[in-house]
Amino acid sequence: MKQKAIYPGTFDPFTNGHLDVLERALNIFEEVIVVIAENCQKHALFTIEEREAMTREVTCDYPGVTVEVLHRGLLADYARQVGARAIVRGVRQVKDFEYEFQMSLLNRQLYPEVTTVFLMPNVKYTYVASSIIKEVAMLGGDVSKFVHPCVLEMMHQKREEQN
């Protein structure tokens, strides 16, 4: 049986830090579904359709990766529905871990068969957060070291639209 995991997030935008965590997950799991979700507590720069398109573009050369959108519902229910046995979460710092630890315990209550796997990105991405990347890019800063070229182009387009 294939070992399947889901890697959820808002991915607004999908950064090289996200890609690093995905690559690490692929060293463990045969199949990883990148699940793009809405988060009403975050102000998205990109629509969910744009985030799906950029994530598909960035991950298109990775065998075993699929990209899906979760429009509604609980992540634990989605994991059960697709037969995932693990939820992959990237953890950059202690603050991330505190939140993710709570979520993993809740998901375990909702779907006892699922395990949350915490993966740390390469140290060069520990300070890379989508929110910071968005802010720097929208102010005209160079974020090319932190995102795939297609994401960079989409960010330039967003900046032009907003100016």
Image (spheres, rainbow, N blue to C red):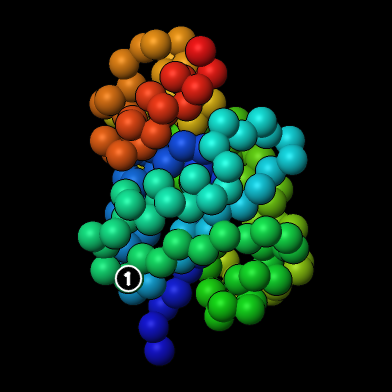
User: Quick check: 49 above or below 85?
Assistant: above
| Residue shown at the point (40%, 46%) measured from the top left | 54
Residue 90, x across and y down, in percent:
47, 45
Residue 71, x across and y down, in percent:
67, 59
Toward which corner of the image does residue 97 lie, by quadrant? top right
| Residue shown at the point (69%, 51%) measured from the top left | 103
User: Quick check: 83 above or below 125?
Assistant: below
Tell me if residue 62 can be seen: yes
| Residue shown at the point (53%, 26%) measured from the top left | 131
User: Quick check: 26 above or below 130?
Assistant: below
Q: Nearer the viewer, residue 44 or 41?
A: 44
Q: Is residue 16 left or right of residue 78?
A: left
Q: Is residue 41 left or right of residue 35?
A: right
**Which residue, as the protein is rendered here, is positioned at the far left?**
61
Q: Amino acid at mark 1?
A: Gly
Tell me if residue 116 can be seen: no
* Number of on-image labels: 1
| Residue shown at the point (23%, 60%) measured from the top left | 61
User: Quick check: 139 above or below 46?
Assistant: above
The quadrant in which the N terminus is found is bottom left
Q: Nearer the viewer, residue 161 or 55?
A: 161
**Which residue, as the protein is rendered here, is positioned at the far bottom?**
1
Residue for badge 1: 64
Q: Residues within 10 Å of mark 1 (few under 14, many from 20)?
A: some
Q: Nearer the viewer, residue 103 or 17?
A: 17
Residue 128, x across and y down, in percent:
41, 27
- As helix, strand or loop, the secondary structure at mark 1 comes to loop
